[in-house]
Amino acid sequence: MLVNDRLLRALHRKPVDKTPVWMMRQAGRYLPEYQALRQSAGDFITLCQNPEFVTEITLQPVRRFELDAAIIFSDILVIPDAMGLGLDFIAGEGPYFQRPLHREHDIQGLRALVDLEDRLHYVMEGIHLTTTALEERIPLIGFAGAPWTLACYMLEGRGGGNFLKARMLLAEKPALMQHLLAVLAESVAAFLYQQWRSGASVLMLFDSWAGLLPGWAMDMCCIDPIKVIVSELRRRTFPEPVPIIVFCKGAGQHCTELMRTGCDALGLDWTTSLGWAKEQTQQRVALQGNLDPAVLLLDDIPAIHAQVDRVLADYGAGPGHIFNLGHGIMPTTPVSNVQCVVDRVHEQSSAFHTGQEKHGCGTNTAIDF
C-alpha cells in the first residue's frame, strides 16, 4: 500500500484530494546534482547502465520536490542498443547508432529481444534498487519508446530532423515497416513486463514522433503496435493489470482513436486542449499534461502561476487529471521554477476536487533519503 497513491487513483479516475503532479525528464539534466554526477561518471551511457547511478538520479528530484511519482532514469533507445545497433551520444547533438538499419536485409533479419535479463539487466536492477529506496512512499514509473519512434531512430541512425528515412520506407515498403514494428512491439512488451516485475507500479509508452505520421498510417504505425503491447501487458499482469500511460506527441487530435489501445491514460502535449480531449474521450481515460515546458523558463512567477492555473482550469473539476508538462523539462530550466509549479498545482488543484472522497490519497512531502 503506497503512502501517496494520488497518481494511481487519478489513473483509475478515482477521487483525489489534489491533482497529482510529476514531470517528464524530472530526473536529469536541469539539476546541478545530476550534472555533478554525470561529470564524475564521464558520459550518459555510463549513467544509464549503472544501477546505483540510475537509482540516485531517479531519487534526486523526489528529494527536492513534493512530486506524486518518480520515473526511472533511463533512455528510450536502450532496446535498439540491446539489439546490437550500438548506441552512443555526441555532446551537443544527441544519440546516434553505430550500426543503423540501412539495408532491407538488416530489417528482415531483426528478431524480437528475448534475453532481457542479460542485455538490459541494468534497467531492472535500477528499478529494484529504486523501489526499495522509495519504501512505497510514491509510485515508480517504468517506460519505453513506442515502436514507431524506435523505428525512426533505428532507420535514421540519429536524432533530429524529420526522420525522412523512416517515412520513405513507410511509403515505399509498408510491409517491411510492419515487420519492423511487429518485432519492436514484441520486444517493448517484454521489456515493460520485466520492469513491472522488477517493481514499477505504472508503465508509460513514449511515441515522441507520432506527429510525423500521415493520417493513413496512424493505425498501422502507432495505434496497432501500441495496442499489441497494452494487450500483452494486460494478459501478463492479470488479475490486477498495471496502469499504462500512452504519450503520442503531436497526435492529440487522434485521442479518441488512441483510446482503442486500451491504455488507462493519454498524455497530451501543449497543442491540444485538455478540456477538448476530456469531452472527446468522455472521461473514459485519464488525461496527463500539458503545460508548455517553455513556461518554466520564465523569470516571472505570476506568469508561471497563471499558466499552471490555466491548465488546471482547462481540465476542470473531477478526477482523472495528472498534471505534467507537454514534453520534457528543458536543460536550462531554473530549479526554483520547478518548485514553483509543483507547489502551485498542489495549492490550487484542491478546489477542483472539493466534495470528493479524500481517503486513500496519503500525504505528500519531499522525501529525505
Image (cartoon, rainbow, N blue to C red):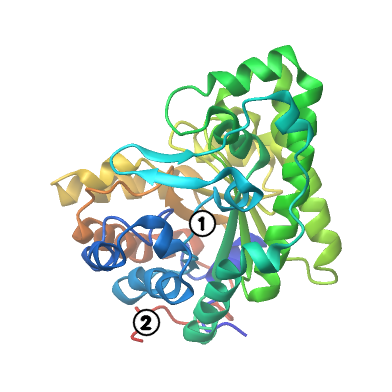
Label of residue 367 in the image: 2
- Residue type, mark 1 in image: Ile
Q: Foreground residue, 147 or 363? A: 147
Left or right, 294 with respect to 104, comes to left
Is residue 21 at least partly visible in the picture? no
Residue 290, image quadrant: top left
Label of residue 139 in the image: none
What is the x, y in percent for residue 231? 82, 52
The residue at 42%/29% (across/down) is 160
Q: Which residue is mark 1?
A: 322
User: Furthest-left residue in view?
Assistant: 299
295 over 305 or under it: above or below: above
Secondary structure under tag 1 reads strand
Residue 92, image quadrant: top left
Q: Quadrant of the N terminus?
A: bottom right
- Give me the C-alpha separation between circle 1 and circle 2: 20 Å
Is residue 184 at least partly visible in the picture? yes
What is the x, y in percent for residue 183? 77, 42
